[in-house]
Each structure stands twice: as structure tokens, then as C-alpha cells.
Image: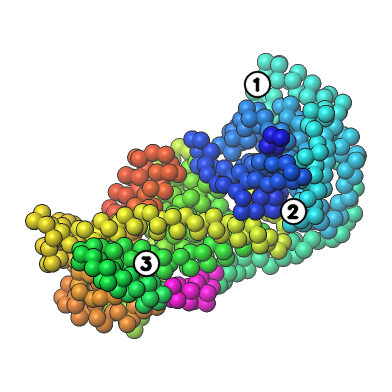
Amino acid sequence: MATLSVALTGNPNTGKSTIFNELTGARQKIGNWPGVTVDKKVGYVRHNDRAISVIDLPGTYSINARSPEEKIVIDYLLEEKPDVVVDVVDASNLSRNLFLTIQFLEYGIPVIIDLNMMDEAKKRGFKINTKILEQQFGMPVVETVGRSSKSIKNLLGVFTDTVMSNYHNSSIIEDHIAKVQELTANNKNKEQVEEEIIALRYALIDQIMAQAVTTTDVGASTSEKIDRVFANGFLALPLLLLLIYAVFEITFTWIGQPLADGLDGLIGDDISPWIEDSLVSLGVADWLKSLVVDGVVAGVGSVLTFVPLIFTLFFCLSFLDGTGYMARVAFIMDPIMRRAGLTGKGVMPLIMGFGCGVPAIMGARALDSEKDRMISILITPFLTCGAKLPIMALFAAMFFPDNATNVVFCMYLVGVVMAIIMAKVLNITTFKDEESTFLLELPPYRMPDMKTVLLETWDKGKGYLIKAGTIIFAMSVLIWFLSNYNFDGPTEEMSESFLASIGAAMSTIFAFHGFAAWESGAAIVTGILAKEAVISTMGILYGVADISSDAQDAVDTASQLMGSMGGSFTALSALSFMVFSQLYTPCVTALGTIKKETGKWKWVAFAAIYTFAAAWVVSLLVYQIGSLLGFA
């Protein structure tokens, strides 16, 4: 029997993705639609010995083909013609959701109308007569509660039992379609015709609602009561900052960091010595042992220690998103973000940027306009990601031991302020002729579905694991080679290596920044490959073994590195170096993600060059102004 193809479609925040995850679990593949950066999710399930392929189409409010999401939905349904199309409708917001349903029927696309969140609808005093609704549309109507396995099984039964060709539009729908076709055939002003068609759709929705839905006044909903506090004009921002602080505490203090410390100890104390002893016992050449231990294990291992931090951060953000609060964050931040030329939704990728720039750049997909998406992509690299944090923590511990925490916090602020400034600059220069749109729906507060939270966490964190296993592996080998070879072959003097030559060339442009040594130039170069490599490169070049990439061990390492650096840095030049490291060119993985998300090499080159230039100017100002004030 052929595989049954099922397409899930509907408005955003209708619980469509929850239904998809409940249906398919881990049996799903995530990629991109051809030519665009919108996620393509396909999953598989069996029911009654029937194989079912389920595709989760992008959430959209209409199918006018004005956005990539709208075009994907209508093109897929008209060209691929899946066996079953399920229009997932938020039963507690029925009138708004039926607008899309009517559009599907206008295009001749028969659908199963899935009244999801029926529990929410009942709480809000809505009683929906599904039999009347079926008669009004001429299409099957089912009820579900997205997180209920029972209702999901019922939905699976509907998939396999329903033959969509047996269903036809009701006379009410046919009359509506005839009126739409009549309007479209008239040679009127296009905008006027569109407005009249929209009015027809809403008139039809009102007619259907009057027949199929009764309401009772149940007073303010739970979500409305919560919003009186969390979306309150006075309390909203402080509570948002408190929640973000709690997420960071969970990630960097309570859960993520202890797990990272344990993994770091496992790699450094157990795995690395075991591999080294095994290679010695096998009698492998010294160069190969050095490549494996000092290059591959040390390089990839230092990145893997950040995996618990990344997964913990993504879990927290996915959990908050599942509660419905993250939509409120966009609403709260909209007035502030608009001053920088973005809408409130632009704050979400920036928050993710504190974990890792790669998923933050990818997170810009959720923004409504191309302008907002591009600006968000181009300013995200300024933020303090997890890979930059060890640089800040180590230098702060070395040169500002009494105020290390405050200095690191200031580096976070430097990144945020620079991102806001450059967003405004890009808004009035590069993207000045493009408009931003901001369409936001506030979903009801609810307890997150943990299966969805865990799947989203794995999906986002998996990208970081792939990065560590592929790109970082290659970069580790490259750094090892550059630091151990020159044109004459192998060298034991790192100061005579390729890396030293490259570092010396790079350092010439920092003559007025206070850090013109070739070692710092080399660290900056490797930092373009991976920001994690800045600290490990410093440790290698200054002869400090086992330098930690863990911010918690910065103080222990600082005294060793401080003595080795000698006169290479002063407190002021160290501050200048920190500012430069905070702002300059994103790592090659982030640059690769920018290419993937924008599809154009020109934006990769632009991001690499303009961030480097901005970092060069700001760090120069820090050093020169500090010198004038007598801090040198």
C-alpha cells in the first residue's frame, strides 16, 4: 500500500508543531525548502499497518504568496497535492483562523478542519458544534488537544479513514467562491478588489460562527490575568530582565556550567591522557601524536566542553517559548527595538546570540520582513557568545582581578550597545528603502509540551555538535600545522612557524592599539577560525600548558599566563584587546551560516569586513583615550 501523504498547515501558534511532534516523535527530518531558509519538517508514522508521511508546513495567516512562508504553503498544496491536508485551527480563536480555511477552499483545496486546543476554547466559554461546522463547510471537522495522545490517535484514524475526494464544498462556500470569482473578473482597482474579497470572507466567517458557536462570559482568562503582571507597562521590562538573568544563572552557574566542568575534566584528565598513552604504546611518530593530542583532541575537546552550556540555554529558551511568554518578550521590546530600526521580534535572535552566534543567525528566520532578518543577522556577531566568554574571563582575571566580574559585564554591554548602534546605522543606510512589518499574536499561557521542548532543544543543539565534529576538527588540524611547520619543514620554535609569520603580519595594524606582538596577531587570526582558539593559541604561544577554556578556571590560569606574557600587555592594552575580541569578525562557522541564510557571498564578505573595521576603530579609541587620560 502506498505511503499516505499528509500536510499540516494553519496559523502560527495553533499547536501545529506540537501535533507534528506528537505524531512523528524523533522520526523526523529537518532541512530547508529549496531556495529559501524556511525550515522544512518531514516526519513518519505508521497506523493500522499504513505508512504515513507528515509534513509540517510553515505557519501562515494567509496564502497570498507575499512572504516565503505563504508561497511555500500554496505552491506545495497546489503542486504536490498531498493525499490529506489538515488545517490546524486554534478553537479559542476560531474567527481569525477560519480566514485561512476559506482561502484554501477558494483555491479548490479540500481540508480536514482540526479544531485544536479545545480545552482552551472551553475555558474561554466557547461551545463549538462540530456537526454544524461540517455542514457549513462541507468538510470533515475533528477535535484535538495537541498534547493528548488519545486525540492524536483519533486524528491518525481520521487520516487513514478519510477519502478527501468524497468531500465537496457546501452551497454556502460555493456561493462565496462565485462572488469572489465575479469580483476578480471585474477590471477594478486591484487593492479595492482585494479589500472587498477580505470583507466577503469575514462576512462568511460571521455567518458560520453565528450558526456553529455559542459563547458564555467566563470573565478574564488566566492568560489575561497573568499579562496584567508580565505585560504590565511598569513591571514588564524588570521581570523580563529577571527571567533572562535566571536563564543565564541556570546556564552558566547552576546546571550548564557544572556539566561543562565535568565534561572538561573527563576530556582533560581521562580521555586525552588515555589517547596519548595509547599512541605512545603503539609507537606512533611524535608528529602524529602531537597532531592527535595537541591538535584534534585539544581543539575539538575545548569546543565540546561548551555543549552542556549550549543545550541548557536552548532548553530554557524552548521552555519559555512553550509557555507563550516569548511572544510577550517581542511585544515588550518592540518600542525599544524600533528605535534601533527593528521590530520587537528582533530581540529573540539577539538573546540566542548570548549562547552561540550560529543558532542566533538561524533564529532570524522567524522575523517577518527581509529587512529585519538581514539586520539581525549582521548585528548578532557583536554579542558575547559562549566562545568569547573565556577570553573575557581570562583577561579580566589577569589584569583586573579586583573587578573581574564588572569588566566581563561591561564587555557584554559593549556588544549589546554596538549591536544597537549598528542596527540603527544599517537601518538608515544599507536597508533604508525597505519596510518592516510587525504582526504578533499573543498565544495563551500554557504548560509547555516537554516532548516538543526536548525535540527543539536537540534540533538546535545538534547544529553545535556538527560544528564541533566537522569544522572545528578541520580548524584544529590547520592550527596545529601552522604552529609546527614553516617553509623548511617541521620546527620546534613556534616563533619561526607559519603561524608566527601570519601573526607578525596581522600585528602591524595594531601598532596604536597597544597589542602589536606577533602572538596576539596570531591569536586574532585563529579567532576568526573559532573564537575558542584565541585562548588556546595564547596558551600555546606563551608556553602555558593545559590552558583552560572554562571561564571558572580563569583565575587559576591567569597567574601562569601573566608571567609568561611579560610586557606584551598592560591593563589598558588588555582592555583594548578584549574590546577587539568582543567585536571583530565572527568565526568561520558563523560566516558559513550567514552564507547559508542569505544565499550570497557578498553578505559574508560584508559581515567579515565591517565587524573587523568596527572592532578596530572602537578598540583604538579605547586605547588612545585611555592613554590620554593617563591609564597607559
- Asked whether 389 or 576 is in front, the reply is 389
Q: Residues within 10 Å of mark 3 (few under 14, many from 20)?
A: many
Instruction: Give the numbered dot on residue 301.
Output: 3
Q: Image quarter for residue 76?
A: top right
**Residue occupied by mark 2:** 146
Foreground mark, 3 or 1, reads 3
Amino acid at dot 1:
Asn
**What span is colored magenta in the figure?**
247-263
In magenta stretch: residue 377: no
Q: Quadrant of the N terminus?
A: top right
- Asked whether 107 or 111 is in front, the reply is 111
**Residue occupied by mark 1:** 189
Residue 342 image point, x, y percent: 50, 50
Q: Earlier in the sequence, mark 2 or mark 3?
A: 2
**Spatial separation of the CA atoms under disc 2 and disc 3:** 40 Å
**Spatial separation of the CA atoms under disc 3 and disc 1:** 64 Å
- Asked whether 277 or 86 is in front, the reply is 277
- Asked whether 110 or 96 is in front, the reply is 110
All told, the count of numbered labels is 3
Amino acid at dot 2:
Gly
Q: Are dots 3 and 1 in contact, CB under 8 Å?
A: no
Residue 406 image point, x, y percent: 39, 76
Q: Secondary structure at mark 3?
A: helix
